[in-house]
Amino acid sequence: MAQNASTLFEKIWDSHEVLRNGADGPSLLYVDRHMVHEVTSPQAFEGLRANSRKVRRPGLTVATMDHNVPTTPGERRLPMADQTSDLQVRTLEENCREFGIRLFGMGSPDQGIVHVIGPQLGITLPGATIVCGDSHTSTHGAFGALAFGIGTSDVEHVLASQTVWMQKPKSLEIMIRGRMSGPRAVTAKDVILYVIRKIGTDGGAGHVAEYRGEAVSDMSMEQRMTICNMSIEAGARAGLVAPDEKTFEYLRGRTYTPENYEEMVNVWEKTLRTDSKASFAKRYEIDAGRIAPQVSWGTNPGMTCDVTEAVPDPAEYGDGDKSREDSARKALQYMGLEPGTPMTEIPLDRVFIGSCTNARLEDLIEASRAVRGRKIARGVSAMVVPGSQAVKRSAEEMGLDVIFKDAGFEWRESGCSMCLGMNPDILMPGERCASTSNRNFEGRQGAGGRTHLASPVMAAAAAVNGHFVDVREMDMQDGAV
Amino acid sequence: MEPFRTVRSVATPLDKINVDTDQIVPKQFLKLVQRSGFGKYLFYDWRYESVEGGSGGASVVPRPDFVLNHPRYKGSAILVTGENFGCGSSREHAVWALADYGFRAVIAPSFADIFYNNCFKNGVLPVTLERGEVRDMLKFGGDIEVDLKAGEVRMYSPGSTAGPSHVARFEMEPHRRTVLLEGLDEIAQTLKYEKKISEFERKSGLAESAIPSLPPDKPLRA
């Protein structure tokens, strides 16, 4: 028995392997769910047309538009002001019509960031293989699905064959022991930033990470999505959490939850977990109790420290590694920061609460706690961009929009927005932003823009203070107006 | 796809680690609906000054200190760089930009997984070598030759007409090697397995926990 023990990842992989090309070669994996958006799909559909190919299983594919769409209320109509975005959006509409693919378009009540709407509509399911031409597809792993990002050529390949070639990754265990200190002040975002800081931006390369331990079991589905979302930032091919009752409950009664769902749950309960004797190729262990609120200071998500710390010295950060030291030096230059500056003393210009990492309802509820009854600091402009139209509606029913607007935040329509600034929401050169998104790469939020990654409650607290604060020491209030 | 042929040229050294795909091709250039023409946007924000809103317009000038702008590396077909090259976004536009610019091979101690995979779809060879060897190549001024068939990277000292001064060996998974060497259309290859895919669908569809198609009776609400 012991030699047949498998990890959760291996079980899902094995049950989706159509064939393998030689003993050590890549496998042809069957894809259960394919999600498509406007930016990485036009060339794929064009390829199908050029070769007179059709979509093999249109019923397993869904599309939405999220990257380019304006989030300014009243601007969500065609033609869009940006002609190239307009063309991409129209191209997706035409492609979906031609190939018979379900589209949640700009005007749909179900529109939203692809990784927010998948789970919300019950399209994401445990044990499924899920792909999308987007690296943050790893988000769906929170449901015990094997979910990973692919390039456009593979989008075309999946459309044509419902399969994808992949070299089997190894299993990685990320054990997060204990409980988080500072309830609701230290969040899933802090956990994953801390993990990336510890294991590095390539610590998970070639692996599928399974997050385990009490801290993970304690997390809500929204929080699990946040940690799985940023698995790619640690270089992992995908991130996973074994499904439990929270997972099954989350998906009950959603628009696309299958009719025989309870029978499926009965099977999943028995099968979708890592066997006790299974072995991981690599393991990391993190003590949740040691994690403080995190803020990034550099130009990749691993360049992160506790909010109570100061901007590091590149030589110390490099720790004898010249390339690492150089990259820290260049990062500080880009970020306009001096070593030794306390993180809480860096003045901010902008605050962005949004993205597939942190724009679900719970994220907005947590952020609102730091904002209620307060005003954003002078000189700061801040916006909330809900992850989907459904999130936006729920938040408005709770009165969260009023809390944010009263404080001086802009309350927007749903989309990827300033996480990557493909739509008009961008930073100006030199502007410094607290962002709940996933990447602080150079120019990510706008050429010359400076991004500090943080949790929703940390970003919200930064908006009202004009700089980061340790939210463990802040008075916060629950409830809507 | 064009078959990969042995390539020899001066190697462009990009001595940075963790180069993300946002740097390889910034987001403002992802709005094209075709695969061609991305070369001019390669490393855009590093290559040019005054960038935002620019699309190759007159207000944009090359940064003389960036390696791609150095006349010495004009026409180079080989990029040598640091660990974890191509991390971040899955955008295949990054590989399209490298290929369109003229790079046929990228040499690094490690690559991010999605980027690595995307290379093979576009006839670009990613070569993984030991860190020390890559460091030597970053400092090397001569020609480098990448030979996939032999699994070799050969370094030729400048001015020398003798054989290579150093030969580094690399491994390549056989399926991927074949795809590159023969320039195969991967989809056409896969569709030869159509029967196996159908058989898989039939068998796996019998399981109680089979993932079903989205119910056709629940169309869009909009």
Image (cartoon, coloured by chain):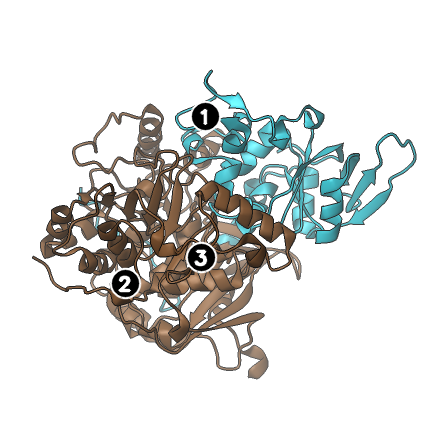
Chain colours: A brown, B cyan
Residue A221 locus on image (x, y percent): 30, 65
> Which residue is found at the position 54% from the left and 50% from the top?
A328
Residue that carries the numbered disc 2 in the rendered image: A471
Circle 1/circle 2 CB separation < 8 Å? no
Residues at marks 1 and 2, CA–CA distance in whole angstroms? 38 Å
Position of the C terminus of chain A, as image quadrant, is bottom left
On residue A304, the disc is 3
Circle 1/circle 3 CB separation < 8 Å? no
Depth order, front residue of B75/B70: B70
Chain under disc 1: B
Chain under disc 2: A
Residue that carries the numbered disc 1 in the rendered image: B50
**Viewer can see residue B193:** no
Q: Residue furthest top?
A: B58
> Which residue is found at the position 39% from the left and 34% from the top?
A429
Give neighbour class at mark 1: few <14, some 14-19, many 20+ (Cα, 10 Å): some
Residues at marks 1 and 3, CA–CA distance in whole angstroms? 28 Å
Q: Which image quadrant is residue A244 in?
A: bottom left
User: In the image, B189: left or right of A368?
Assistant: right
Q: Amino acid at mark 3?
A: Thr
Residue B178 locus on image (x, y percent): 69, 45
Above/below status of A356 relative to B162: below
Residues at marks 3 and 2, CA–CA distance in whole angstroms? 17 Å
Q: How many marks?
A: 3
Instruction: Identify the secondary structure beneath mark 1.
Output: loop
Position of the N terminus of chain A, as image quadrant, is bottom right
Of callouts 3 and 2, the N-terminal one = 3
Give neighbour class at mark 2: few <14, some 14-19, many 20+ (Cα, 10 Å): many
